[in-house]
Amino acid sequence: MQADYTLLRELADSWGLLLMFLFFVGAIVWALRPSAKAIQDDASQIPFRED
C-alpha cells in the first residue's frame, strides 16, 4: 500500500505539474490565436447590445 501511494505521489509531483503547465500554455495560445479575434470582438460588444 505504501509503495503505491509513493509512486502515485511522485507521478503527480512531476508529470502532473508538467501536464497542468502544458494545459495552461495551450489555453493561452488557444485564446490568443489570430483566428479568434472576430469571436472576441463579438463577445466584447455583448454588454452594449440592446434588445
Image (cartoon, grey):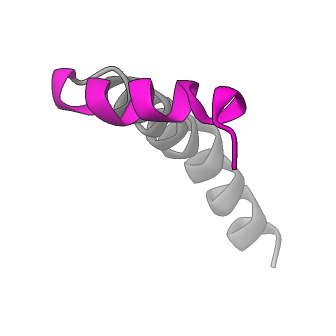
The structure residue drawn at horizontal position 57% and vertical position 35%, both measured from the top left corner, is 17
Please tell me which residue lies in front, 28 or 43. 43
Q: Looking at the image, which residue sits at the far bottom?
A: 1
Residue 49 falls in which quadrant of the image? Answer: top right
Magenta: predominant secondary structure element? helix
The span shown in magenta is 34-51
Q: Is residue 12 above or below residue 7?
A: above
Q: What is the x, y in percent for residue 16?
A: 56, 45
User: Is-magenta flag for residue 48?
Assistant: yes
Question: Residue 37 lies in magenta, yes or no?
Answer: yes
Q: Is residue 39 above or below residue 11?
A: above
Residue shown at 67% from the left, 26% from the top: 48
State the residue at coordinates (69%, 39%).
Answer: 50
User: Which of 32 and 40 lies nearest the eye of the viewer?
Assistant: 40
* Residue at the outermost right position: 2
- In terms of depth relative to the viewer, which is nearer, 40 or 13? 40
**Residue 4 appears left or right of 11:** right
- Position of the N terminus, as image quadrant, is bottom right
Q: Residue shown at 71%/31% (left/top)?
A: 47
